[in-house]
Image: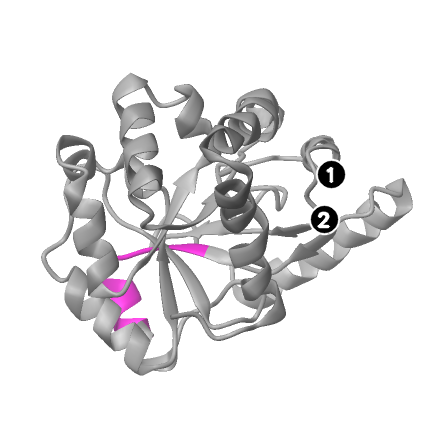
Amino acid sequence: MHCHLLPAVDDGVKTTEESLECLRAAKEAGFTDIVLTRHQMAGVYTVKPEEAAAGRELLQRSIDEAGLGVTVHDGAEHYIDEVFLEKLTDGAESLAHSTAVLVEIPMTRIPPFMADVAFKMRVKGLAPILAHVERYREVVDDPRRAKALAEMGFLLQVNLGSLVGVYGRRIAKTARTIIESGDVFCAGSDVHGPGWIKPCYQEGVAALFEFGDETARRLLRDNPSKIIRGEALS
């Protein structure tokens, strides 16, 4: 859950070969279902859902031909801005056609309208998942901000690479603090290409198991599986 492995749609992989290399590593790490969460940002990344779905079908065909044993699902990572808020009246592209919607915000500040966003999405029956919560500056400065976001109605996602210092030591510490608090809903790779395989699928997964098998399985398997199955998320 959360990767940029749909070829040539954002700042992730550029070719099918790169995607297959990453997906092969994901399978070796134990993953069987992958949600392709391309960036969606007004004026920057604007691939339409039907275009992404067509690309996902082509990628699945290549996966099957390679015998990887992985299923890829439609999805997106939405940047919360005015355009997203305007389109929210019509709903939002979800993860694997579930009620879960992956969103991100500016790294430098938490917008003042976050509670309103969570409320509007929940009213529509959508479950907002806030991507890589440990990376936002205000959360790094005060990890208690993560709990405040969870209390607003956001489900929290942490990047595996954060645990092993991909984004720096402070973010690594923040990620661990938030996981220990029990407020994290799921972990994701946020893989953008082959260079992310080792820190995310290998070292990151191992680091998460340091919190105990129960926690690791809940964040990597149990809760993400609820999304794949289309279960209601609280």
Q: Secondary structure at mark 2?
A: loop
Residue drawn at x 76%, y 48% is: 70
Few, some or many residues within 10 Å of mark 1 (<14, 14–19, 20+): some
Total number of numbered labels?
2
The amino acid at mark 2 is Thr
Q: Residue 162 versus residue 12: which sits nearer the camera?
A: 162
Residue 170: name its quadrant. Answer: top left
Would you say residue 81 is visible in this rendering?
no
Q: Residue 18 versus residue 103: which sits nearer the camera?
A: 103
**Residue 159 in picture, x, y percent from top left:** 43, 37
Q: Disc 2 designates what residue?
A: 32
Residue range highlighted in magenta: 77-87
The numbered mark at residue 27 is 1
Q: Indicate whether 211 appears above or below 46.
A: above
Q: Indicate whether 53 appears above or below 231.
A: above
**118 relative position to 210: left or right:** left
Q: Residue 30 versus residue 122: which sits nearer the camera?
A: 30
Q: Indicate whether 120 appears above or below 161.
A: below
Is 80 included in the stretch rendered in magenta?
A: yes
The color scheme shown is one colour
Q: Secondary structure at mark 1?
A: helix
Residue drawn at x 26%, y 49% is: 105
Q: Are marks 2 and 1 in contact (CB under 8 Å)?
A: yes
